[in-house]
Amino acid sequence: MSENSSSSDAILDRLHSLAHWLGDPVRDLAILGEGNVSAATSSEDTETFWLKASGSSLGTMRRDQFVLMDTRRTLALLDRESLTDDEIKNHLLGARSLPDAAGMPSTEAALHAVCLTEGGARFVGHTHPTPFLSLLCSERAEEALAGRLFPDEIVVCGPAPCLVPYFDPGPPLARGAREALREYTETWGEPPKVVLLRNHGLFALGKTADEVERVTAMSVKVARAILGTFPLGGPRFLSPAEADRIRTRPDEHFRQRVLAGEE
Ligand SMILES: [Zn+2]
């Protein structure tokens, strides 16, 4: 076995365990067919990626229920407007690296491809955590998500969430999220770790599967904390200067590296 195929195998193994971690009922992040995960198949490039096949459940899916996708062909879907549902399905089937392989790619394939390219992620976890649904399906979601609450949130989840308005799932949502991700990167000088979809759920972007787990766990804690502030008058966010101080403190940079396993 070549070094490349063995590392690709290790990536798929880790993606499989990430799916089970995210789908564990105890975490209340995704039930039934909700959510999906993806990972670049090589640590060197993003030419292909593994994606959960539609119809499987995160918590119980088998290792053979991932589909290998061609990133360029998947992203080409975003250049084609007004496709019928059948045309989208056929495009996604044709974007598989091995067209004869089994498995229908998730409808959010193009959004995963955006996160793995423009988002700079190597692993992506998409879930529908109940505390986030409470926030994202409320009248006051923008207000509730307008700032950062506490230092550890900034260390793990970055300077701000990237909030995406509601779009029809599939190519319209992937195009809307790509736009929001580009604006975010221009504003903050780095891609987001957390992409929040109005009336839908959460995308956690990580360099590793461990990071996807950390970002998801911390984000859900934040969502619970935000909801808990409303009976007490609503969130009191850190000021931009306080939040910026956390981002630039050397001890917080050290903590980020420790969490990433680099120290
Ligand atoms: Zn979803």
Image (spheres, rainbow, N blue to C red):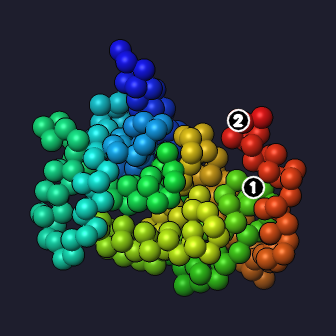
Q: Seen in the image, is 112 located left or right of residue 144?
A: left
The number of discs equals 2
Say which quarter of the image contains residue 103.
top left
Q: Which residue is situated farthest in the top direction here? A: 1
Measure how far apart labels 1 and 2 are at the Cα level: 14 Å
Disc 2 is placed on an element classified as loop
Disc 1 is placed on an element classified as helix
Identified by mark 2, the residue type is: Gly
Seen from the viewer's position, the closer of residues 23 and 257 is 257
Q: Seen in the image, is 196 located left or right of residue 166?
A: right
Q: Which residue is situated farthest in the front direction here? A: 44
- For disc 1, the marked residue is 155
**Relative to residue 187, is residue 61 depicted above or below?**
above
Q: Seen in the image, is 61 located left or right of residue 203?
A: left
Identified by mark 1, the residue type is: Val
The crowding category of the residue bearing disc 2, from other C-alpha atoms within 10 Å (few below 14, some 14 to 19, many at least 20), is few
Q: Give the residue displayed 31% in from the left and 73% down from the top.
A: 172
Q: Give the residue displayed 87% in from the left and 50% down from the top.
A: 251
- For disc 2, the marked residue is 261
- N-terminal of the pair, mark 1 or mark 2, is 1
Q: Quadrant of the C terminus?
A: top right
Residue 128 showing in the rendered view: no
**Marks 1 and 2 close (CB-CB < 8 Å):** no
The image position of residue 108, as x and y in percent, is 33, 58
The image position of residue 73, as x and y in percent, is 24, 54
The image position of residue 62, as x and y in percent, is 34, 31
The crowding category of the residue bearing disc 1, from other C-alpha atoms within 10 Å (few below 14, some 14 to 19, many at least 20), is many
The image position of residue 121, as x and y in percent, is 51, 50
Q: Is mark 2 within 8 Å of ligand 1?
A: no
Q: Quadrant of the N terminus?
A: top left
Q: Give the residue displayed 25% in from the left and 70% down from the top.
A: 79
